[in-house]
Amino acid sequence: MNIQQVIKENHLELLFQQGSFGIEKESQRVHADGAVVVTEHPKCFGNRSYHPYIQTDFAESQLELITPPNKKIEDTLRWLSAIHEVVLRSLPEDEYVFPLSMPAGLPPEDQIKVAQLDNPVDVAYREHLVKSYGKSKQMVSGIHYNFQLEPAFIQQLFARQNDYQSAVDFQNDLYLKIARNFLRYQWILVYLLAATPTVDANYFRHGTPLKAGQYVRSLRSGQYGYVNDPSVKVSYDSLNDYVTTLEHAVSSGQLIAEKEFYSNVRLRGAKQARELLQNGIQYLEFRLFDLNPFEAYGIALNDAKFVHYFILLMAWLDEESLASAVELGKEKLAQVAWENPLSATAFQAEGERVLQQLLTMLAEIHADAEMGEIVKEKLAQFADPSQTLGARLVNAIEAHGGYQKLGAELAIRYKKQAFERFYALSAFDNMELSTQALMFDAIQKGLKMEILDERDQFLSLQFGDHLEYVKNGNMTSHDSYISPLIMENKVVTKKVLAKAGFNVPQSVEFTSVEQAVDNYALFAGRAVVIKPKSTNYGLGISIFQQGVHDREDFAKAIEIAFREDKEVMVEDYLTGTEYRFFVLGDETLAVLLRVPANVIGDGVHTVAELVAQKNDHPLRGDGSRTPLKKIALGDIEQLQLKEQGLTVDSVPTKDQLVQLRANSNISTGGDSIDMTDQMHPSYKALAVGITKAMGAAVCGVDLIIPDLTKPAEPHLQSWGVIEANFNPMMMMHIFPYAGQSRRVTQNVLNMLFPELKS
Amino acid sequence: MNIQQVIKENHLELLFQQGSFGIEKESQRVHADGAVVVTEHPKCFGNRSYHPYIQTDFAESQLELITPPNKKIEDTLRWLSAIHEVVLRSLPEDEYVFPLSMPAGLPPEDQIKVAQLDNPVDVAYREHLVKSYGKSKQMVSGIHYNFQLEPAFIQQLFARQNDYQSAVDFQNDLYLKIARNFLRYQWILVYLLAATPTVDANYFRHGTPLKAGQYVRSLRSGQYGYVNDPSVKVSYDSLNDYVTTLEHAVSSGQLIAEKEFYSNVRLRGAKQARELLQNGIQYLEFRLFDLNPFEAYGIALNDAKFVHYFILLMAWLDEESLASAVELGKEKLAQVAWENPLSATAFQAEGERVLQQLLTMLAEIHADAEMGEIVKEKLAQFADPSQTLGARLVNAIEAHGGYQKLGAELAIRYKKQAFERFYALSAFDNMELSTQALMFDAIQKGLKMEILDERDQFLSLQFGDHLEYVKNGNMTSHDSYISPLIMENKVVTKKVLAKAGFNVPQSVEFTSVEQAVDNYALFAGRAVVIKPKSTNYGLGISIFQQGVHDREDFAKAIEIAFREDKEVMVEDYLTGTEYRFFVLGDETLAVLLRVPANVIGDGVHTVAELVAQKNDHPLRGDGSRTPLKKIALGDIEQLQLKEQGLTVDSVPTKDQLVQLRANSNISTGGDSIDMTDQMHPSYKALAVGITKAMGAAVCGVDLIIPDLTKPAEPHLQSWGVIEANFNPMMMMHIFPYAGQSRRVTQNVLNMLFPELKS
């Protein structure tokens, strides 16, 4: 089969470029000076017996971060970023993640602890590795790149050939072709992307082979790296040969287990190689990538894309004669690995030829123009070795006075970066902050998570066989469907709450301005709030706190409310302070006071300056990508100032409270203040009761309370419930402006997965 | 206190006009000839020990229909209508509801069975009544009108007076004033609204007191009616007097129980009169109203409104000197009751004066202009007695040759009317048909129902302490909230169903036309359906049943879909027929086949004529107020005809199937055909599994099945799930175009109230 021809004739170009991508990335936890720590794997990462994302590799200090497979390489890197942010923010304050593959400041061998896994077989395997290779070699870190061709693509190819009867055989041979070609040309990736030019002398068991000042392209891919003894020979000629030779290496004692076979291409899809004969190769694991220290998470997106198309090229190109090609590739790899990264490679012509073939392929399969640019940049690095990653790293090491110093400085920088927007999961910043917080917690504790719909904030979470779905961070199977339906209708909400015996302000609904104004007498003299029936953003609401005394004022407020909805409510206004109760199940987890946008005078600065100062707070921003919103100085705020006899240029006296808004919404610059511990427990119990009356598992209940220290009494003067919200903003409680943080997302996970010990 | 002045000075006019209204209406079940039946109270009305709406009064044959209290008299009459429709449609085919107060064709006394209630005390009480009054008198039917002033109005009045310290005393005296004034002027209502001018001779125990051809205004309100012995004297001077005198009448043996006191005004709010002293009178019951036979449900809306303002007038007017007024009123009542309905009343001047005072009151309290018209019409009836209800009834009786014949004819007519739109609950026709069906079932079985929000189709249902909320007829606490969230997102739905192992067609989403068209190769040659991600009405959907073979066609379909949404899906098209499975809990209750709008030729009529014939079907109408929709003959239908080489004027051959639509939606004139019994059970089990995977209690599942007789196999060629709907139209299953009706609303009630035996 001529694969190029089949692809082109059958419009399979796009299908060919699809697939699944997964990344595993090892790295050492280190001290601020870059030296490897000897502490235990942090307890907050749950249990390694099941954690899908945060594991340890060889050593207890060696993190292994694993992304789930994704259809887009970009998503895989987003996961890698998210897992890193979770790890970096969860590590002890004095620990960092080392960005280089070669470990620095290795402790004496007796202090290096192998990973303390639950399964004694796993520990025994590691002890065997210590004997065979020594601990130091096992401390090297790298990236494994997993790639699966789109199954539909393989099916389409299979349907258009006559050589194979079995789809599994066809698939195996296709993957084997890629594996062989990859082994033949892997040296190109090492030339371009290797980043292990040096290491401390104590890394080597028998003294360093490097001359003073000598740098190589890849210690890791060379004979001193994480490689098997050269006597281990495994054939890629056919799957049968692969299985037979690999099993022989184990049975003859060359390897203790199949997984000790450190080939740069592993055939994946089964625990034991022999099972591949039955099920077929499912995907390939490419293991030769050094950590890129200039990237916070070890690999650049463009390089990941380049690798993808390089792998596709391995399928696209015809093979050289079988037997010698793989061996030739290995020899070239060894030679290139030991070259000086600042000089050209001995195989420059072949490298340039292959990348030219890659460019040709890109054109033929109509790849994005961006890919062409990426490949051309790599191609130019053959003529200009100084632009290779290895060369740039050598220069950086020289500039910083050693690779440990460079690594330490970068490790500190990357950890700091991970805290810049500590309330967000940067890679998923298009999602809601509350959902990001829940995702953070799920990744930390090791719940298997899938994003079913990013725009819709729809996640699935899984622990063992237990599957749960979550929308908007708190809508789950624990809520009854009728409860949000009740809550999104204020009239029904009040009827339901009144039926259940809670204090609810009375209200009357109107469907026209005239009808409402005709009923003015019903409200004359009473403290009322006039609001649209079903908006949620505080729009169109007027409050007559001291009672409505003028028919015209009343009519005006009614008109304003009708701009937002076809129905308007006139409701008893309760005197007191509004608090938001966040209820989950049988407990009020958090109570929040929302204070209207304000600044406090200092007798020196103008209102505008005070606002600017307050807006510098790290939690303030646009209010959707940040927990709090910057205070605006628009018409509404200026009107509010005017009522206090102020302008933006006034200088308020020291401690003068300057109101910039009448409403307390966080979305208009309000402050959020945690009051959970101050609130009398009787109100917390009421909020739980209200939540239960609604049939909700998670609910935000707004109560008006004149005195939060006095116990609740059964009348409207003591307290009243004004709203229940089925999609409460969890973020306000997690990152309040003042007071204690309440990590309510963790409670949501505990509710969904009570079996998951935290 | 001058009540008129307080109302005007404090703008209480509207509050004065508010209140609560409830109606109890008795009537006899009769044969087609108007004679009273001797059958048992129908079993389908559940159990009389708790039924809030459908009870029996004295006799087993005597229905007592009870509305709940409502803030608007209009709503009370809507309830009265709804309860009647339930009753009339539930009665045996040969039973009717007699529209006249006086019974006709009474069986011999020994065949009249008193109501067979569970409580032996209730039965014993009825047996006592038989002894005291004879059975015939107990067979008279009427309407009791319950009215409560708006409590806030009474509070406002109380706050503005100084005579009373106790709010309860104030309230009692206000209600007593109304009661006394009512008793004083009740004769006016008898003059205007009485409708018992005659009765069969066998009604009387001791021979008829009516001369041949004599008609009176009200047999029921006169001495031969449902009244106590004149020796029973109960005082309305004060609540204390009322309680004392009433208790004396019982203890002295004049009455067997307080409830035997048949005053035209009863003080309500407690089981025993003495309790009123503690809790206060809550409302008044006015009992003098005869059934209006010209109204299907016994009372005209305008008359009900008139009574409301007449009662208000009783509060508004000053009283005459206490002691004599009530007795004077009773005397006038007796005299007016015995007048000839065709002649003027002896008290015309007083009647006109009182109604003039009523008009004055209407003006002073700014009542709706409509009320003035109603009162003026009544006022005119003093000068023109022929327009009184009694006179009109006498004329009708004469015209029909007797009141039994008139009653029988009207009874048959009203029953027929109740079946005209047998699928609807006419009074609540602004609500969805499925909700109307559920309300019908709830009323029939005796669940206490409250309409929390009519536009939102929001009900509460209660049985004892067990309270449930229902929206749209099937959204309940039994559904998990996450399930509708899953179902309203097609992408998430498919991911969830695929995770659970169900056959789901593959699909790809696109966010731009260009992106989709660039991926044309993915779909070339495949049968696909192209649709917007989240519309529900079949808009923007294109189907390439034979595979998409042209890039331009594909692009066009993509563009059409993008008109409806920002995201578009291209999905595998499954060959086979689409069936809708209605699942509730562990069972598929109904399976429906929807057939695109069509007519079958007869070789004679044109397409247009055939469509007109088909549209005559009673289930067809606008599709929202009817279960099925009339077939249109618009552009789309004409295009569809053109593709078959037809126009609206073509005459199709006999048995020729003429397609008028490609899509099978009921909302575009499609036919609904019940296939529940034909469907292989394996698919029903699948639909249940799909519903469970969604976490739903009630779900509409759309499956594509090539052969409904063959058992399901685990691949897309055997079946595939294309949609799950959390708000399935129940109406389609209840009233299919063809096949068996499935009363799924009853199953919803059984699910919510398993304790309610059906």
Image (tube, coloured by chain):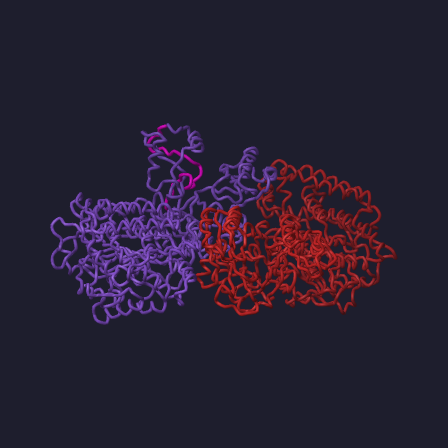
Chain colours: A purple, B red
Q: Which quarter of the figure is the N terminus of chain B placed in?
A: top right
Left or right relative to A449: residue A391: left
Horizontal relation, residue A410 to residue A696: left or right: left
As drawn, A731 above or below A153:
above
**B671 drawn magenta:** no
Query: Which residue occupies the foreground of this view, A387 or B349?
Result: A387
Q: Is residue A657 magenta?
A: yes
Question: Residue B238 or B71: which is nearer the viewer?
Answer: B71
Q: Is residue B397 left or right of residue A443?
A: right
Q: In the rendered image, which quarter contains the C terminus of chain B?
A: bottom right
Figure disc tally: 0
Per the picture, the main secondary structure of the magenta-coloured stretch is loop
* Place of residue B371 in the rendered image (x, y in percent of width and height, measured from the top left): 70, 42
Position of residue B30 measured from the top left corner of the image (x, y, whole percent): 75, 63
Q: Is residue A444 among what the camera can see?
A: no
**Part of the protein shown in magenta:** A650-676
Across and down, in percent, residue B308 comes to: 68, 46
In the visual, does A143 lie left or right of A675?
left
Q: Residue at the far right: name it.
A: B212
**Residue B309's x, y, as percent?**
69, 44
> Which residue is more in the foreground, B168 or B413?
B413
Does B758 sit above or below residue B262? below
Work out which residue is located at the far bottom of the displayed protein and give it: A251
Q: Is residue B452 visible?
A: yes
Q: Quadrant of residue A69?
A: bottom left
